[in-house]
Image (tube, rainbow, N blue to C red):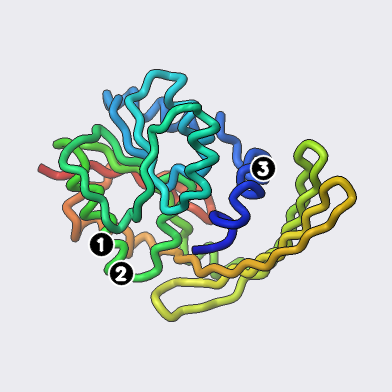
Amino acid sequence: MTQLYSSLAEIYHEMYQHIFDYDKEFTFYDSLLRENNCSKILEVGCGSGMLARRFLKNGYNYLGLDLSDEMLKIARAEVKEDLFLQGDMRKLSFKGQFDSVLITGRSIAYITENKGIIDTFNGVRESLKDNGLFVFGIFEANAIFDNLNDFEQNIEHNDKRIRRISKLKRNLETGWTYDWSAKYIIENKGTISEFDDLTTLRAFTRDEIHLFLKLTDFKVKELIDEGKAITIIAEKKI
């Protein structure tokens, strides 16, 4: 597992409050879920609970799942309730419990092999009620590989300064995958710490994602193009 979600979990929690617009993201999910009468939801890749607290505040019957214990410790502190499970999205074992399953934060990008995608989608399908809604985001391969550029981010959180220098490199061993090498330079009260991290991410073509969903008995309702990313809204076939 990438250090970003383990030993650097606190840094993630502080950084991504400034990188993601969680209010905007929640508004999107809330509108979609209400439109489809979804109240009992599973958030896969729930991370440090920034969306969880918004779902709970707005009355959803919520369960969060993440692979990282360190992230879940922050999430439990964030919402002051233990509505979270540690688990692998490739091994979901719920049986028709949820109106909707959300894989948030484009976490599906960390599943780099086809079998893992199929296992994840089958597990989501089994976890949904009839006509349940599956919502997730992907990185779009053509857009990603057209612009596989290095980038840098500088964030201030309270008295802490966080600098992340990211380098991206093709790695096509298991599909449209690429390596993300990141250096974190953290200045806190005059002390500077540095950490290096490396992970492999997967992008998808549109045809691929349609095929994966077809093979696992989902019907695509809508694709929302966001440039380098796509949000997919699919429905469990019955």
Q: Position of residue 156 (x, y in %)?
A: 78, 43
> What amino acid is at disc 3?
Glu
Where is residue 8, by image quadrant? bottom right
Question: Quick one: label 3, few (<14), some, or many (20+) residues within 10 Å?
Answer: some
State the residue at coordinates (47%, 72%): 177
Disc 3 to disc 2: CB gap under 8 Å: no
> What amino acid is at disc 1?
Ile
Disc 2 to disc 1: CB gap under 8 Å: yes
Question: Quick one: label 2, few (<14), some, or many (20+) residues within 10 Å?
Answer: few
**Residue 58 versus residue 200 in the image, above or below:** above
Residue marked by disc 2? 114
Q: Which mark is residue 118?
A: 1
Residue closest to the eye, 182 or 141: 182
Q: Position of residue 190 (x, y in %)?
A: 89, 50
Horizontal arrangement in the rendering, residue 39 relative to residue 48 (left or right): left
Question: Quick one: label 1, few (<14), some, or many (20+) residues within 10 Å?
Answer: some
Q: From where the camera sits, is residue 200 visible?
A: yes
Q: Position of residue 195 (x, y in %)?
A: 70, 64
Where is residue 81, by image quadrant? top left
**Residue 23 versus residue 177 in the image, above or below:** above
